[in-house]
Amino acid sequence: MNESSKNVGISCLNQSKNPLSSVFSRCLLGSALIVNPLISHAAKVTELKPVVVQSDKDKAAISKDASTVKGSTATKSALSLAETPAVVSVAKSDDLEFKGASSLSEATHYMAGITPDSRGGVVSRYDMFTIRGFSSNNNYWNGLSLMYDNWYLYPQLDNSILDRIEILKGPASVLYGNAAPGGLVNMVSKEPSFKSKNEIGVKLGNYNLRELSGDFTGGIGSSDFSYRLIALGRTEDGQAKTTEAERVVLAPSLKWEPSDKTSLTVRALYQNDPKSGSYGSAPSKGSLYSNPLGQLEPDFYDGDTNFEKFNREQRSLGYSLRHEFKNGITFKQNARVMNSKVDYESIYGSGLQADNHTLTRYSIYSYESMDTQTIDNQLSGILETGKVKHHLLVGLDYQNMDAHLNTGYGSAPTLDIFNPNNSQVTHAGIMSSMYSITKREIKAKQVGTYLQDQMKWDNFVVMAGTRYDQYDGSEVANGTKTKVNQNHVSSRLGALYTFDSGIAPFISYSESFEPQSGSGYDGKAFKPTTGQQIELGTKYNSPNKKVSLTASVFDLKKQNITATDPAHTGYKIQSGEAQSKGFEMEANFTPVDRFDVALTYTALDMEYTKGDNKGKTPTWVADKTASLWGQYAFTSGVKLGGGARYVGETYVDAANTGKTPGYTLYDASASYKTKMMDKSVLFNLSVHNLTDERYVSGCYSTSWCWFGKPRTVEAGMKVEL
């Protein structure tokens, strides 16, 4: 990006004192400078066709050009990404399978705006990353929140059941309520299809990976019903020595389509993770920094095999209903009930002693169960006023959670990190050492109403929305009850204009909120934390569909962060603020037939601007990230791909006493599709961290650092029956 385009973005974002209409008009015209230096002027395209809402019988798969995705996370509507004044990254199931990405975390490796793998390859039981500098803890599945209890019962879905993953960048509370300011993740399930396809797969790899899967779909006779059944079993060794990971998935679904105006899809899921590796870490001396006694290996394990457990079960039942009335109004309803539980036991490191080899350790257990109910009701329709077409959306959603926890903390023997004995304790002995035991009941309920109007006039799109949320939460801990009762109004406003060349500058303003528990010295309950973002960017989609690009600059702030009360010892006030400013770019292009290239780049400047850590940058936030991926599909059925991904420096701790160095990793994939005994067969090979780089992906403090994942090699085969 040249200096003129930088100046346009910065001057626009600094015009907060100007009337909003003036800011929008100036920025929309100026933002085209972001992309003009990057592409040549394309031939004129034909006039845009009216937006058409596809029926549910249309093929649900995403085309190669992600800009054509409709019903996206960004709008809950039929507006394509190319016409949406927001930034959304999309990862499709076929691409994830080819690259060997088996988790949400791995799916983010080639996306802009994300610092991946906060806790390296050791911690695979959770998907941990930051979006535009902020942690993402409240993910969505088919547009409904995967609520969690803020302890250890954090839901995780296997990629095998997903059609795509969409990540909306920036605040998203206008449609979803409680959400982190950095962005929102929505995972979309694979749908039943009337086209019959029965597939069995097997996968083997290093770390003793063994996996068997099946995907069966088709119509039921000549009826209006179609089905899908996805099943998977996987076992492998964890990165930390002595640990293992296991998973069982069963996901049946049934779809009823009596007409192109009505559909009902019912989905069920059972997922069990009897073992899930380790949640442990490594001290910075010996991992990030040099240790005079030697260096640790990436398979370092700080726990004990006799007190290591993570057994998570997830059960859900839900449905998606859609009906279009004769007057053109469409009603949609998504609902899901979910029951989850986890038994967690662990011994963990908590600091290296002065002798540089003795690790202080503690123990923890947490037995948790959680029931959630979520429902989202939508009414949408089109209203024309002169030359302006209004895509109106009205919604009411409800979220409810009831969780029960039994948690204890205790002591544990030390560990010699260079001569470790990982089998020192007995289960009974550790349980008897627990000195802090708490039984909790946590409840949370959110009710939100929202309104959105997408106004389209020729090539000009304006999107405006507002939402009101009422949040009620409570926690009873050993008989002591605390409550949170908060409400908030969130808004969004955006505009986009598509020129005949395919260039589409846009600008948007969006807000977020997150409930905040606690109170200050005066006894008044804290307010929700709030976020605001101004974003200025440009999208480009070439007439021949061989080039698509999104580039933007953004200024994102989060307020009401708790900080130390300088006037009252031991109390907090909401004086903290964090600011994230950056440039983000994603490009996809096809320089020659059958050769696809994807490029991403992010530059991020984030710090606390007020409060305890003023002037400091949070951990797990890289200053720069970049990636390049290319793949070529031969006519013989062979496809080859490879990529490089760079993650820049991150700070070691909240005080910014040091940095983890940036790292570059290389990946490669290959597949071959052929016929064997009249059956379609697909062979796949993927290698992550091709050069087996030893690196630390992130630290939370000098006591807790995490090694990145060493080289992994996976080979698979799928056969269509």
Image (spheres, rainbow, N blue to C red):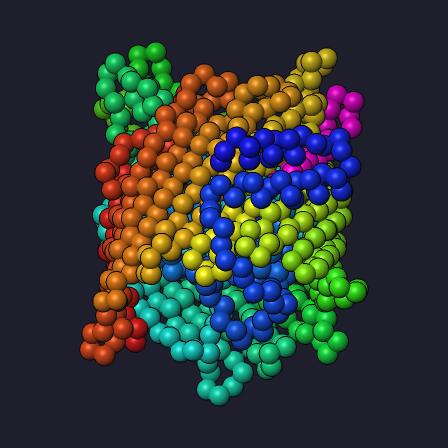
Q: Residue furthest bottom?
A: 222
- Work out which quarter of the rendered image holds the C terminus and state it: bottom left
Residue 265 or 82: which is nearer the viewer?
82
User: Residue 406 location in percent, x, y?
Assistant: 54, 40
Q: Residue furthest left?
A: 677
Q: Is residue 699 above or below residue 714?
A: above
**At x 50% / y 33%, what residue is drawn?**
2
* Residue at 64% across, 31% down: 11
Question: Residue 252 in magenta?
Answer: no
> What number of labels is visible?
0
The answer to whether residue 155 is above or below residue 431 is below
> Based on the displayed image, in which of its 4 quarters is residue 720 positioned?
bottom left
Any magenta on residue 526? yes
Q: Residue at x 69, y 69 (%)?
A: 331
Residue 568 at what x, y percent from top left?
Answer: 72, 14
Q: Position of residue 16 (x, y in %)?
A: 72, 32
The percent position of residue 41, horizontal first and vertical second, equals 49, 50
Q: Is residue 127 visible?
A: no
- Looking at the picture, tell me which residue is in the foreground, 446 or 604: 604
Is residue 241 left or right of 59 when viewed as pictured? left
- Residue at image location 60% in from the left, 64% down from the top: 48
- The boundaries of the magenta stretch are 518-536
Residue 123 appears left or right of 484: left
User: Looking at the image, is 650 positioned above or below residue 564?
Assistant: below
Left or right placement of residue 672 versus residue 445 in this view = left
